[in-house]
Amino acid sequence: MKKTSFLFAAAALALASCGDGDGNEMHYIEMLYPSSHAAVVMADQTSDSLVFASTDSWWLTSSADWCTFDPEYKHVENPYQGSWLSCKMFLTFTPNTTGQTRYAILSIDGGESRNGATYAQVPYLGITRPQRLVSSDLMTDSLYTLTLAAEAERDSVCFRTYSTWTLKTTAAEPWLTLSTAEGRADKHIVYLTMTANTTTAERRDTLVLVSNGVADSIPVVQQAPKKAAN
């Protein structure tokens, strides 16, 4: 699942610049990534980056202990004051097993110039089939049920993980099989194979995807056959 940029107007830090006493010297920090001052990362994601350019020396801080960076670069001197110095900071995240979206503000303080970005780490994995309904504030989410026709014999689930993963069925009486049950970090399609449902009731299963210690559930339903018209 491609990482999504999101705007958190309330959380993003405002850009500030000012001149010297004569109004000639400018102080500026420009955010290059995330360009919208905010980014969303997945629950099993453990790395990303922060890219910016500054005309000043600067100090970098994180508001959350789950989002860290090399402390050697907490403060960097710009030897060419007034000229642009670009920097790409590599961030490290701990997997989000809290069950809730959490936030970290990366603040860049140049003394007379300030900027920053907000990173939101959601509590779920990057499942794209079935789709997930997420509220605009990221506080609530719901994964749609993968609904199969009674006569269906093949379908699939799609996802992206940032770690090795496993996928398993949990039905007491399994009625579908998986084309693969584990893999490496990447985008994946796992095919589901089942026989047509000839019973009088729908069949249900829950697939459990686990990556980096984070578990996510995919509900699957195969409909009951339609009753023949009299």
Image (cartoon, rainbow, N blue to C red):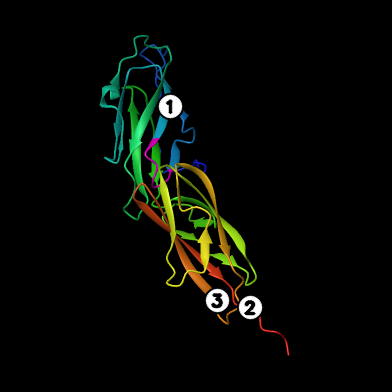
View extreme (top): residue: 80
The residue shown at (36%, 46%) is 212
Amino acid type indicated by mark 1: Val
Q: Residues within 10 Å of mark 2 (few under 14, many from 20)?
A: some
| Pointer 2 or 3: first along the chain | 3
Q: Quarter of the image containing the C terminus?
A: bottom right
Based on the picture, tell me whether residue 119 belongs to the magenta stretch.
no
Left or right, 55 with respect to 67, comes to: right
Residue 120 in percent (x, y) is at: 40, 44
Whole-angstrom CA distance, mark 1 to mark 3, is: 51 Å
Residue occupied by mark 2: 225
Q: How many marks?
A: 3
Nearer-N-terminus badge (1/2): 1
Using the image, determine if residue 25 lies above or below residue 225. Answer: above
Residue kind at label 2, given as amino acid type: Pro
Q: Which residues are magenta?
A: 41-47
The residue sitting at 34% across, 32% down in the picture is 107
Residue beneath label 3, please? 202
| 112 up-or-down from 122: above or below | above
Circle 3 Cα neighbour tier, 10 Å, few/some/many (<14 / 14–19 / ≥20):
some
Provide residue 12's location: percent of width, then percent of height: 40, 38
Task: Tell me: residue 79, above or below residue 163.
Answer: above
Find residue 148 and report its horizontal and vertical position in percent. Answer: 60, 67
